[in-house]
Amino acid sequence: MQSAQSFTITAHGAQMPAIGFGTMELPHRPAELVAAAIASGYRHIDTARKYGTEERVAEGIRASGIARNELFVTTKVTEENAREADFLRSVETSLKALNLDHVDLLLVHWPQPKVPFSETLGALAKAKRNGLTRHIGVSNFTLAMLDEAVNVCPEPLVTNQIEYHAYLPQDRMIAALKRHGMILTAYCPVARGKLLDDRVVGEIAKARGKTHAQICLRWLIQQPMVAAVPRALEEQHIAENLDVFNFSLTNEEMWRLFDLRKRNIRIADPPERAPKWDIEIVT
Ligand SMILES: NC(=O)c1ccc[n+]([C@@H]2O[C@H](COP(=O)([O-])OP(=O)(O)OC[C@H]3O[C@@H](n4cnc5c(N)ncnc54)[C@H](OP(=O)(O)O)[C@@H]3O)[C@@H](O)[C@H]2O)c1
């Protein structure tokens, strides 16, 4: 078994630690929680301009004392900044807030249909070529959008960060990402807590002596090219979410969890910016 730090997923030259710390909505002690996550072994931090947590992430990184080159930091540009000039300004603002000269991964946070993808993805590639980020990717892109983004972007995309957990099927997106050699970064990996009350998850957790969250996260990262960015406010939860590299689920356990996707529960669906999601038919 590999240690948390060494368990990385490789795509187009990027080496992404399979579990990252999500920083959306950290209402209390955000910088302390980021520092606690790093102290417990996280090397991948997921933030975004929209979350308003970049400054706190910077404080947490500073407090942790970790060397910059040991961290994999992701931030995102909102859909309001899809035009090239706005996009590049947003990246500069993020870097200033993060107190970094570059991030490891920069994502288009949500697709912006009013701006040609060639412009937004061109700006994303330019941010990479200008050294503002080591790698680039997208978030919340549908199948058709992903194909178009890959086609128009002059630099390789390493991930599509999307909602993925045992209650939401993503079979077609997984196949598409595989075709493009990209990582699926799963957000809402424990379905914002909904999966923690699930009977099947509970049975497997009990049998394995693991917590419900650990079973959900292990199920994700045991799939090829899947990473996850759970968020937790309890320090014990933060630590246990990373402690998923010293056991494996059996094929039967994996399939019992795959079967839960028939529930088809989507959590992050903001009407003002969500695209028309692809339909997944699960038999
Ligand atoms: N790209 C996008 O558009 C997008 C959208 C949404 C989210 N994200 C990213 O994904 C991250 C995670 O998503 P999320 O926060 O929406 O959902 P999540 O990680 O599935 O769920 C967070 C909730 O689960 C609970 N939890 C986590 N680990 C737990 C554990 N071990 N035991 C018990 N409860 C646990 C947390 O409780 P406690 O707080 O009590 O610990 C919290 O209430 C975000 O922070 C963000 O970085 C990205």
Image (cartoon, grey):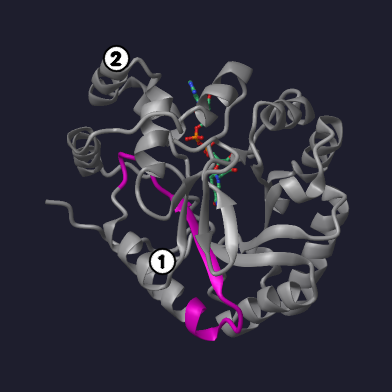
Q: In the rendered structure, does residue 156 fall within the stretch colored magenta?
A: yes
User: Residue extending furthest front?
Assistant: 1
The span from disc 1 to disc 2 (Cα, nearest Å) is: 36 Å
Question: Which type of secondary structure does the marked residue at label 1 adopt?
Answer: loop
Q: In the rendered structure, does residue 173 fall within the stretch colored magenta?
A: no
Which numbered disc covers residue 142? 1
- Is disc 2 surrounded by few (<14), some (14 to 19) or many (20+) residues within 10 Å? few
Q: Would you name the residue on which mark 2 appears?
A: 206
- Residue at 34 percent across and 38 percent down: it is 219
150 over 220 or under it: above or below: below
101 over 148 or under it: above or below: above
Question: Which type of secondary structure does the marked residue at label 2 adopt?
Answer: helix
Whether residue 77 is visible, yes or no, is no
Total tally of numbered discs in the picture: 2
- Is disc 1 surrounded by few (<14), some (14 to 19) or many (20+) residues within 10 Å? many
Of residue 127 and residue 240, the one placed in the foreground of this image is: 240
249 lies left or right of 143: left
Q: Is mark 2 within 8 Å of ligand 1?
A: no
- Image: magenta residue range: 149-168
Of residue 174 and residue 68, the one placed in the foreground of this image is: 68
| Quarter the N terminus occupies | top left
Whether residue 248 is visible, yes or no, is yes
- Residue at 63 percent across and 64 percent down: it is 79
Q: Quadrant of residue 35?
A: top right
Q: Nearer the viewer, mark 1 or mark 2?
A: 2
Q: Quadrant of residue 211?
A: top left
Contact, CB < 8 Å: mark 1 with mark 2? no
> What amino acid is found at the position of numbered circle 1 in the picture?
Thr
226 lies left or right of 153: left
